[in-house]
Amino acid sequence: MQTITNLPNEWSYVIGPYNPPVAVVKPGETITVLTADAFENKIDSVDADLVNIIELPFVNPLVGPIFVEGAEKGDTLSVSIESIEVTRDYGVSALIPEFGGLCGTTFTRMLNPPLPARIMLHPIQNGLITFSDELDIPRIPYEPFYGTIGTAPQVEAVSSLSPGFHGGNMDAADVCPGNTIHLPVNVTGALLYVGDGHATQGDAEVSGVATEIPTRGILTINLIKGESIATPRILSKDYIMTVGSARPMEDAARIAFYELVVWLEKGYGIERLMAYQLCSQVARVRLANMVDILYSVVAKFPKRYLPSSQKI
Amino acid sequence: MQTITNLPNEWSYVIGPYNPPVAVVKPGETITVLTADAFENKIDSVDADLVNIIELPFVNPLVGPIFVEGAEKGDTLSVSIESIEVTRDYGVSALIPEFGGLCGTTFTRMLNPPLPARIMLHPIQNGLITFSDELDIPRIPYEPFYGTIGTAPQVEAVSSLSPGFHGGNMDAADVCPGNTIHLPVNVTGALLYVGDGHATQGDAEVSGVATEIPTRGILTINLIKGESIATPRILSKDYIMTVGSARPMEDAARIAFYELVVWLEKGYGIERLMAYQLCSQVARVRLANMVDILYSVVAKFPKRYLPSSQKI
Amino acid sequence: MQTITNLPNEWSYVIGPYNPPVAVVKPGETITVLTADAFENKIDSVDADLVNIIELPFVNPLVGPIFVEGAEKGDTLSVSIESIEVTRDYGVSALIPEFGGLCGTTFTRMLNPPLPARIMLHPIQNGLITFSDELDIPRIPYEPFYGTIGTAPQVEAVSSLSPGFHGGNMDAADVCPGNTIHLPVNVTGALLYVGDGHATQGDAEVSGVATEIPTRGILTINLIKGESIATPRILSKDYIMTVGSARPMEDAARIAFYELVVWLEKGYGIERLMAYQLCSQVARVRLANMVDILYSVVAKFPKRYLPSSQKI
Amino acid sequence: MQTITNLPNEWSYVIGPYNPPVAVVKPGETITVLTADAFENKIDSVDADLVNIIELPFVNPLVGPIFVEGAEKGDTLSVSIESIEVTRDYGVSALIPEFGGLCGTTFTRMLNPPLPARIMLHPIQNGLITFSDELDIPRIPYEPFYGTIGTAPQVEAVSSLSPGFHGGNMDAADVCPGNTIHLPVNVTGALLYVGDGHATQGDAEVSGVATEIPTRGILTINLIKGESIATPRILSKDYIMTVGSARPMEDAARIAFYELVVWLEKGYGIERLMAYQLCSQVARVRLANMVDILYSVVAKFPKRYLPSSQKI
């Protein structure tokens, strides 16, 4: 099995078509990917110099681009996540001034004084995360996923901090072991990027940071030729899902639900407006992030309610 | 037990301090409430004249105001929902032109041609809802809740179609049997309003309409003297929850999470910024509605992670 | 000429159908109106106790309701503003913590520390406003307008702090002497409210407060029978204008432009999509406020480009 | 004088650091730039095949990158616009389905049927634009500006359709002859891009398209060493201006006003909160666009109110 990673000082900080591939994979191939955490593994103490470590635009380092043989614009890339192991005995979370869901940011500009910087280290052991020794609360289960996964747009190079139609920094906990994510192919070779492992994360990732970890993940790459999608899709045992990323947040939800309705129509033969009305009764939503350059919303349709002739 | 409802042509269409009470209850009292559906029970056929039935502002009729003895501005009203029965053998959903999450509306004004009006009747029997005979899908469990519940603001009279700091049309499925909702008291007697029963609803209520039903509900009313809250709170077996209602949707999420953080600080002694960081790891979110006059987001903190000395 | 005002402790803090009229006027009548400033004229020193003076919901006091004889739902009320005099020798501006365009608010909830409270008094003399003696800048011309003017909705009572389809707290500098504003009539008598005089204001009213003044204004009230409008319209020598109030701000702009396009179509015979394309070449926009409960945007079409057969 | 343009099939469709310069200029140099219109000059008839001409992402072609000698990250690029001539005898406007301010788009996703595609040609002669022969309205003055001008971000390549902190597709009519725009330098050589000439445009560019023209422009390029700015600034005879680009629109306004306040503080010695209060009295705002990938708002401070010791 290929093990793929970038050279230490050559992480990718954008998802785009301009950098040479770090690896080539064949459709059907299973690979191991080694990722750094969102802070480039530079934080090993609560006293680390957070503000200097976060030297924009060089945060959220990604592995990639990974070139997929045979992928052409108009295809769909399918990435099945077999496993995500943490490769360190702790995760990191932080308060980053001018970043987060409940503070002024570079986009939602405020004259208020900023919140302080703050780092927490969260020991991880036996599948359990210790949030804090100070707080007498149970340990949190290790439920890892990739915060960032995406394929190159045709001409844009998008910050690794941003999600979008190409995937990217969605921070959707559904991108986890056992699930498969579909991504649009916009350029020859698809050019897959992945990183930003999270040991766990609350919906919305409200403070802006999850339990950030370096990972060893196993992925199986497949290619769906001649079928194109407009936005990422995720399949789990129980749900088919679409991801919308936009601001304001209602536009993220609109994209996700629109694509879910279109999928129910084209993929499962449920007339479009009936699908709309059905989603209004049975759909589920995950607010994936309310902190990134765009917000991400996952619209979920329970497979249980797919027409019986069409179950997948 | 008192049975409370409004006279047939005297439903409330606003939540405010201006109408005389339809009933008086004592703290600790358990009452039965009879509500009409959001269309005033006027739809009994898919051929009903939807556009004329929806004669704004006379939609989403509420029972109320219910005067609670002893309630004064600055208190908190607690409403425990014991049960919600449907009093008809079907629910109604509909497409309403210029209303919904994926179409131009009176707020998100578009020049596009509108979507068509359309009515569906959904038979309800033995705790199961039939979405459609045309579509070969399983029946949907009956999981009822009140779409609208709230207390009068001090001087405003708010449309029954709008949620807000006073509660109102949140369309949050957590307002269900087994749960307790806390609402701010802004005027003497609190003046509680309730209605808009839903037999089931998807997160976001994306088409704008759930499975709308008339109900017979049993509620226990309590009063928490001298404690005020800024926005509705909900308690279930597993979560403490806060509701934010605003546009754009990120502001609804901000209100909900801000109030959750404040609650964790003042109610459970978790320092504010640590609570913020903890929510970023373990919180859950329900997108309650993306269609009403304001959007509603429920931020949920798992009771499991409350400090052990403080569990409620 | 009638002089209309409210009793000192009986200002209106909502725009709605529930309070008895303070005066009755006939269509065609010219009246004098005496308004208090947004702080109820309570600030006469930079050391005033701002936080206690702003005792929500009792801010932005309005004169009204004024009952207009013959006005019925479906008509349009026309208010021509003849003059607005300041009745004090200074205006007041302030920083109000948790209110304003560049700070966390009760809607855009932030954990950041709030900005400080601060009051400024601005002497007004000979048509000129002194912003500050500390700052060596020219005096500002006195260009008065009403921040708040509106008619009662049918069943809602809306805070005097909020704009909406009914007019209200738009903070649009186009509501000034020489111009005429059209407002929808939703109830018998129209029930007009007016207040919130501004001696001058920047577009957007970014800190949340203009140069607030008590006023003596002269208004001529007319009635347009049998014609209804969806949102306020303003006519000046040079422009026809529509006002949209909503959040997010793009929805305010959408409402304003949609109504402007509809007006060009129905009022001036310019086909709807051509009107849309023409606005894209010649329209002007005023961002009226970015601080109130809803934001207000004024879309302006230059009369110069109205079809020559249709000039008004 | 250098005349700079790109080869016909080698326009730039992103603003980024990845493409080789098409020209090198020295600080102080005056250049001529030849730009194509937003449709690559492909439309010469109202019957042109609009949907095929708009082959995303290959729209809004830009001239560039232009390398400025001596420019380094942390400097500011100053571009004075001397003149913009139209190089064709007509401009083009259009309705583009799923693009515009009053219709569903790829971001504000709607299930409504789309608006039709439509092209208009607008003759330009003697400084006057004929909007339409069908409509009896005066001709519109030729008031040209660049819709798109920007400098490369450090690692991102941004679609030429998007504005941002780097400038880009702001569609701000203040980028016109007589004015000077300041842009951040993020990479060696600054890498300037320019295009998207407009013969005139309404505020907001509501239908999504202005009067699009190919141009011959004369620009003078200067470099301000060692001074960095966060967002574009524009200087005219009467105003100093800042541009914010974001969604929702209030965030665009927040960025613009925040940067204006900071400029008044750092550049003119007006204490920050006093500047905030002063802007609330005298600032002006242009809503530049409500249709692009981000919305753009220009906050304007009248030079007349700059402290007299500091006038520029």
Image (cartoon, coloured by chain):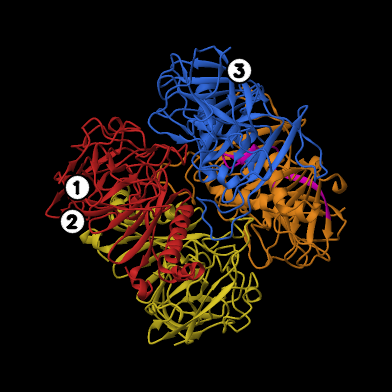
Chain colours: A blue, B orange, C yellow, D red
* Tag nearer the camera, 1 or 2: 1
Which element carries disc 2, helix, strand or loop? Answer: loop
Q: Is residue C165 above or below residue C40?
A: above
Instruction: Categorize mark 1 by other alpha carbons within 10 Å: few (<14), some (14-19), many (20+).
Output: some
Q: Are marks 3 and 2 in contact (CB under 8 Å)?
A: no
On whether residue B202 falls in the magenta region, the answer is yes
Residue drawn at (67%, 38%) of the image: A44
Q: Is residue D96 above or below residue A103?
A: above
Instruction: Tell me: B279 left or right of D63.
Output: right
- Write down the residue under mark 1: D31
On whether residue C140 falls in the magenta region, the answer is no
Q: Which residues are magenta?
A: B196-221
Cα–Cα gap, marks 3 and 1? 61 Å
Q: Position of residue D212 (x, y in %)?
A: 24, 45
- Write down the residue under mark 2: D139
**Residue type pointed to by label 2:** Arg
Q: Nearer the viewer, residue D258 or D215?
A: D258
Q: Nearer the viewer, residue B138 or B270?
A: B270
**Residue type pointed to by label 3:** Ile
**Same chain check for tags 1 and 2:** yes
Q: Position of residue C182 (x, y in %)?
A: 41, 67
**Same chain check for tags 3 and 1:** no
Question: Who comes first in sequence, dot 1 or dot 2?
Answer: 1
